[in-house]
Image (spheres, rainbow, N blue to C red):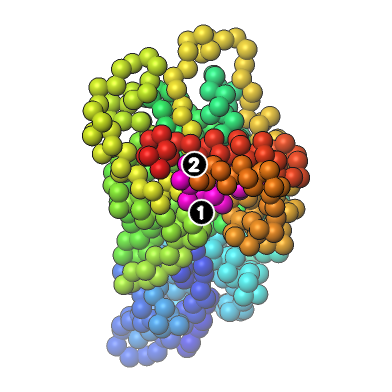
Amino acid sequence: MLARTLCFALQGVDGRPVWVETDVTGGMGSFSMVGLPDTAVRESKDRVTGALRNSGFAMPGGKITVNLSPADLKKEGAAFDLPIAVSIIAASRQAALPQLDKTLLLGELSLDGTLSPVRGALSMVIAACQQGIDCVVLPLENGAEVQSLSGMRIYPARNLLEAVNHLSGKMPLSAQIQRNYEDSLSVSTPSLDLSLVRGQQGARRALEIAAAGGHNLLMIGVPGSGKTMLARCLPGILPQMTFEEACETTRIHSVAGLLKPGQGLMTERPFRTPHHAVSAPALIGGGTDAKPGEISLAHNGVLFLDELPEYAPHVLEALRQPLEDGVATISRVRGKAQYLSRCMLVAGMNPCPCGYYGSRTRQCHCGEPAIRKYLSRISGPLLDRIDLQIEVDAVPVSEITASAPSEDSATVRARVQAARMLQLKRLSAHHLHCNAQMDGAALRELCPLSSQAQQLLSRAVEKMGISMRGYTRIIKMARTIADLAQEHEISPAHIAEAIQYRALDSKYWGG
């Protein structure tokens, strides 16, 4: 007898429907699986056999053929265990299981029949919803991951027997109660509050501008000046993620297998800090199966690269395209995938190998050639993609021990949120979310400059040797500075402040 169940395969962060067709016929006992299964899928035979027997079912005799359709789509992972087991039960008539073609089944089986969580559950359930499937049976620990999706009937099951009893109508499971995304946001708190940062008023201002406009930021300063701490405060002043952003971010982390069992939608913006020994595939994405890299795991959040010149130059150069396009395209022999990579790049570095070039407290012992060699590891095209460049000096002890508390993250976030609201209203027709995402057409339409502001910017470009990309980024920063001030026009003062954040090119790199 033939039986069919429905599952989904992952292509990047997208789900593709896969029909699990099982045919049980007489003859010599055998088990074959076709349809481009990978090793984990092929090994499901042993897991399914043990799970069936230990759940009170029998592995049927005769010839068993399992076809994963479409046949030209690579099938990976253990999510096919449950649909394979259920299709064998239905094909061998051990239980009457109606409407299997209208229910998404996914889950990894242990030998005792227990259902274990699988990666990519959110992507597969979203894809099922888009295909008109609104009924899902999945492992209990994947339930929280999809709990914020509306219009879906989610039935978390502990084991194979519970799933089969539900599908047969013998002991129906209760659909889990879906919760609003706003309820998840209410328990989100920043991991590091800006009130802990003493002094550094210039750096705090730059951090606020970067957060308000989604701009990339480079901090240059002596060791121990607080660059890392400032960067770690950034997620706490960014606006809270929308439901769409939370889904995008969670899908990437789920596909990468980074969600903890029982974890729901991610409500806090990601903060990724790869070590400077990271490889290009680990940073951009890749490997034999085209997995997401750090820049995609930081989507809608922050990618922090500390000690920037210590990264291999070819690794840093690989950042240029995904930073510009907001998408990392990974092509491999076994697969091709696109992962969103709209993140804020925040980098920290010392001004020289010893770290004290230009310091007011300690003398630098590096020679001019060593400093130039050190700084030359950062290319001009990469610097062009960093909007704000600031110097961060050591904080005096008097400021560290000051009793007056610094402004906290919640206060700064309120200003950032107000600026972002202006941007969303202005950019909605262009389907953009923040000023940093504006292209040339949006810039010309939405950021007109007065004659005085244009003259000031033109003089700065000629004197400082700023590239055309740097020119447009100054206008974007000025637009953000005006938004923070709740002003509709870009004034010369806004342009002047934005120009200051491009002055380190000429100081350190002679641009």
For label 1, the residue is 468
In primary-sequence order, the first of circles 1 and 2 is 2
Q: Residue at x 55, y 27 (%)?
A: 202
- Decide if residue 215 is in sight here: no
Give the percent coordinates (x, y) of residue 206: 56, 34
Does residue 54 appear to the left or right of 248 in the view shown?
left
Give the percent coordinates (x, y) of residue 352: 31, 30
For label 2, the residue is 463
Question: Which region is colored magenta?
Answer: 463-479
The image quadrant that residue 78 belongs to is bottom left
Kind of residue indicated by mark 2: Lys
Closer to us: 264 or 205 = 205
Closer to us: 461 or 194 = 461
Give the percent coordinates (x, y) of residue 428: 71, 58
Q: Residue at x 54, y 49 (%)?
A: 471
Circle count:
2
Quadrant for the C terminus, please: top left
- Decide if residue 251 is in sight here: yes
Say what secondary structure mark 1 lies in.
helix
In the displayed structure, would residue 38 be above or below residue 150? Answer: below
Verify whether residue 470 appears in magenta. Answer: yes
In the displayed structure, would residue 169 be above or below residue 63? Answer: above
- Would you call the spot at circle 1 few (<14 residues within 10 Å), some (14-19), or many (20 or more)? few
State the predominant SS element of the stretch in magenta: helix
Verify whether residue 42 appears in magenta. Answer: no
Say what secondary structure mark 2 lies in.
helix
- Would you call the spot at circle 2 few (<14 residues within 10 Å), some (14-19), or many (20 or more)? few
Quote the CA–CA distance across marks 1 and 2.
14 Å
Q: Residue at x 29, y 21 (%)?
A: 364
Evaluate if marks 1 and 2 touch, with contact meaning CB atoms under 8 Å apart.
no
Kind of residue indicated by mark 1: Met
